[in-house]
Amino acid sequence: METIALQSDNQKQTTIDFLPLQGTDYVEFYVGNAKQAAHYYKTAFGFQSLAYAGPETGVKDKASYVIRQNKLTFVLTTPVRANNEIADHIYKHGDGVKVIALKVDDAKSAWEETTQRGAKSYMDPVTFTDESGEIVMSGIHIYGETVHVFIERKNYNGVFMPGYREWKSDYNPCDSGLLYVDHCVGNVGWNQMNPWVKFYEDVMGFKNILTFDDKDISTEYSALMSKVMSNGNGFVKFPINEPAEGKKKSQVEEYLDFYDGEGVQHVAIATNNIIETVSELQKRGVEFLKIPASYYADVLDRVGHIDEDLKPLSELGILIDRDDEGYLLQIFSKPVQDRPTLFFEIIQRKGAKSFGKGNFKALFEAIEREQAERGNL
């Protein structure tokens, strides 16, 4: 009987993992001025110059700067003329995430598996080659104008991908300890969370691993709902938020208004030492949400023992939460552009696999204070 059960489990696993993902390859942002944005992310966040594509490399309609820190890669793309898809995207949404690129072993298979399950194709499988080998890319549309691009780079050993040249810079600030993408959060419209949950389940084989309703994520004034989607091996996680009824406008509604549609709300980035990382980021001018001192009065009663001293955590405004497997430390930046849309989370996991449910009230009250200052609550 045991053998039969094992076979059944293996068959089930094979069925589930029709889209094996190796993690996030890069996140691409469409921005109004990529040259200046690259300087900002290098200066403020500690990225290093990696690669460039633009008019000088034969790309006539856009310029892209690739920056990297450990396993975290951002691509910053700007149009060099008006009246094109990138320029229109920026005019409508402001600076924001266009592409969440996922690393796969077979980009053609990833595209076939997802499109035959109902995904709308963004890019048919295409192979790019240069003297360093080949990269295969394909892509599908997700919420809003955001897309997933599948990247197969097992036969490539160049600096980034064909069409890019190495970008060497005399200005390379030291890194800030940012490691890789922990998760990306999407904001979708009213009653759109469950359809997108179903999309990730049916089209990409993800599972809903956590659900937060408006009782979990609410304050006196506003509420939202969220479901966390994870791929089979847990390397890729996408929480999806939608607004819920409240007395005033929620942060998701504010985002949808100013982004003019659905899109990526924040990118969560892992670190192994959040105190050092956040101290460094603050020194470089990154602004974070302020948490009232009262939060720290009883936080250890709630989360129990932690390895870190509470004093620097409270001075920096770092939040703490625990689940059955450990605890986590997290902090959220203010929006990194003038529209109150995209921001970043810095997270250190000490065993915990959750997303800070115990911090939601303090976090969203901090966001509401910012909304009120902007006149958007």
Image (cartoon, rainbow, N blue to C red):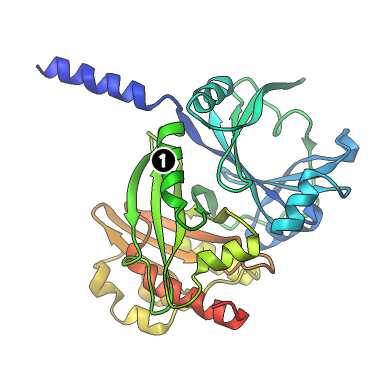
* Quarter holding residue 343: bottom right
* Quarter holding residue 259: bottom right
Looking at the figure, which quarter contains the C terminus? Answer: bottom right
Q: What amino acid is labelled 1 in the image?
A: Lys
Can you give x and y, in whole percent of width and height, for residue 33 in the image? 80, 56
Looking at the picture, tell me which residue is in the foreground, 333 or 252.
252
**Would residue 216 be visible to someone looking at this image?**
yes
Can you give x and y, in whole percent of width and height, for residue 93 in the image? 69, 57
Q: Residue at x 40, y 74 (%)?
A: 362
> Is 315 left or right of 208, judged from the image as shown?
right
Looking at the picture, tell me which residue is in the foreground, 346 or 338.
338
Q: Residue at x 40, y 41 (%)?
A: 230
Residue that sits furthest to the left in the current view = 1
Q: Residue at x 45, y 39 (%)?
A: 199
Q: Is residue 137 above or below residue 306?
A: above
Disc 1: CA contacts within 10 A as few (<14), some (14-19) or many (>=20): some
Can you give x and y, in whole percent of width and height, for residue 71 in the image? 56, 42
Looking at the picture, tell me which residue is in the foreground, 82 or 333.
82
Q: Which residue is mark 1?
A: 198
